[in-house]
Image (tube, rainbow, N blue to C red):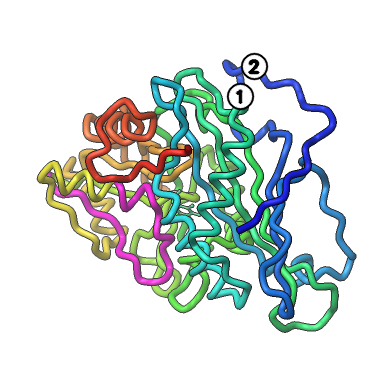
Amino acid sequence: MEIKVERAKTLKEKPDQSNLGFGKYFTDHMFVYDWDSEKGWHDARIVPYAPIQMDPATMVLHYAQETFEGLKAYRDPEGNVQLFRPEMNAKRMRNSNKRLCMAELPEEEFVEAVETLVKYEQDWIPTAPETSLYIRPFMFATEPGVGVHPANKYKFVIILTPVGNYYPEGVAPVKIWIEDEFVRAVKGGTGFTKCGGNYAGSLAAQVKAEEHGYTQVLWLDGQERKYVEEVGSMNIMFLINDTVVTAPLEGSVLPGVTRDSMLTILRDWGYKVEERHLSVDELMEAGRTGALKEAWGTGTAAVISPVGELCYKGEEVLINDFKTGELTQKLYDTLTGIQWGKLPDKFNWIHKVK
Ligand SMILES: *Cc1c(COP(=O)(O)O)cnc(C)c1O
């Protein structure tokens, strides 16, 4: 892939690394790549970060053909730059795009684009502990026209934002609202894709949970509202007695890179891991009896989010006295240790940016 570069005339001042927050600052440049049905992918370029002008009839604004990804670049203790399993994001984006009848970007080009932009913007990768550069690739329909059909034009864009901890308070337990009215996804729908529409549809439940004093929503399956699927925008795992249980990937659950990595680490440690349907009744009963030892959400942004309390139909159960569990903490330390290059890369997950 030939990537043209147009350098920004003035560069921004870098933000204070001790107060980055999440997704507040954007770097000087972005990657842009266009597709149309005649030329295919063309004009790969790095250009100054700037607004994108669109016709009011641009199809994404009406029919929501939009998908995205999320991954991070990390600095190891020597200051070298590394990515974590970017080929998984490349593959997932292709699967998302296929489901939404969008152009598919070859996986090697996705990785090359990410790597080239990160390298170009490497001065933006923070060095303070617990920080990284969040990478947001996304694609959307750019053809103007009213009338529902798959668009004939798309833009693939990558923007970068230096980030600190997703939660300002760091790794700390959150209160979770189990939603029994709204659903996020159904089998046969778009639950396994990372598309903006899934998020728009999830907001009503999120607002409801917050109104009741909860941080995030635990989603039940769309057919029966009986089986546990995900928490907010993370996958979720439960330690029940000595077994780790998580929902299987059957179309409605997002196949998280963090989920896959943690399951691999857990199996390597000799834990019993079950990818199976877990009913909310079984979960609440395990909470009542104390069989539910720990629960945590997993995702690139927050890495791990311990669950300290569940509320279902007015009943509340506490998990591990609302403290971060031992296994939860160990998983966080191990995965972030690999990502920040402090622990050996036993599973060959690290992609060095050269
Ligand atoms: C992105 C996302 C996840 C986590 O995926 P990672 O690859 O681990 O970041 C989980 N659930 C939903 C709904 C998501 O959008």
Q: Residue at x 68, y 74 (%)?
A: 40
Residue 16, disc: 2
Residue 137's x, y, as percent? 60, 52
Give the structural element (helix, strand or loop) at label 2: loop
For disc 2, the neighbor class at 10 Å (few under 14, some 14 to 19, many from 20) is: few
> How far is mark 2 from mark 1, CA to CA?
6 Å
The region drawn magenta spans: 242-261
Identify the residue at image location x=46%, y=37%: 302
Sort mark 1 into few (<14), some (14-19) or many (20+) by Cα contacts within 10 Å.
many
Q: Residue furthest right?
A: 56
Residue 321 vs residue 57: left or right?
left
Q: How far from the left and from the top, in percent, is residue 183?
A: 50, 64
Residue 110 lies in quadrant? bottom right
Image coords of residue 193 (percent x, y): 51, 65
Q: Is residue 322 above or below residue 291?
A: above
Along the line of sight, which residue is nearer the eye, 287 or 243?
Answer: 243
Q: Which residue: 35% across, 59% down?
A: 228
